[in-house]
Amino acid sequence: MRKLTFAFAVAAALGAAALAGPASAAPGMPAGVSAPDAVTHVQMTPMERRMERRAMRRHMERRMERRMMRRHMERRMMRRHMMRNM
């Protein structure tokens, strides 16, 4: 299903590119106006970096807790199942 959707997307993109032909990058803009060439780099502040790391750590801890709880419950159920069959 994913491959089929991807194939349709590629075919649509190629079809649109073939229909567009040689067009300008910004057809709606006047000829005298151009986009800025400079690329601005945005760097995180130390506080933002710390907040992101704390959020990721909390996310991983909660994920591990859910995984441990699920394994614990699975083992409990297996044990109950085995004891019932004895």
Image (cartoon, rainbow, N blue to C red):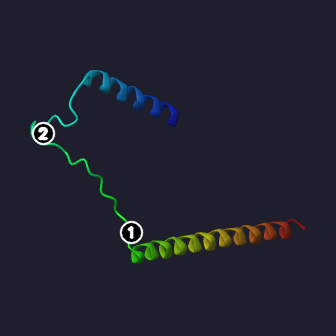
Residue type for callout 1: Met
Mark pair 1, 2: CA separation: 33 Å
Q: Quadrant of the C terminus?
A: bottom right
User: Above or below — where is 18 with respect to 53?
Assistant: above
User: Above or below — where is 40 with respect to 76?
Assistant: above
**At 63% from the left edge and 71% from the top edge, which residue is drawn?**
64
Q: Could you say which is closer to the camera, residue 26 or residue 54?
A: 26
Q: Could you say which is closer to the camera, residue 78 or residue 12?
A: 12
Say the numbered circle drawn on residue 9. none
- Other residues around mark 1 within 10 Å, as few (<14) / some (14–19) / many (≥20): few
| Residue 10 visible in the picture | yes
User: To which residue does mark 2 refer?
Assistant: 29
In the displayed structure image, the side of residue 9 where residue 57 appears, left or right = right
Decide: marks 1, 2 in contact (CB < 8 A)?
no
Callout 2: helix, strand or loop?
Answer: loop
**Across the whole image, how many numbered discs are drawn on residues?**
2
Callout 1: helix, strand or loop?
Answer: loop
Residue type for callout 2: Met
Q: Earlier in the sequence, mark 1 or mark 2?
A: 2
User: To which residue does mark 1 refer?
Assistant: 44
Q: Residue 81: x percent and y percent? A: 80, 66
Q: Residue 13: x percent and y percent? A: 36, 29
Q: Which residue appears farthest toward the right when viewing the image?
A: 86
**At 19% from the left edge and 45% from the top edge, which residue is drawn?**
35
User: Above or below — where is 10 with respect to 43?
Assistant: above
Q: Residue 6: x percent and y percent? A: 46, 33
**At 25% from the left edge and 25% from the top edge, which residue is drawn?**
20
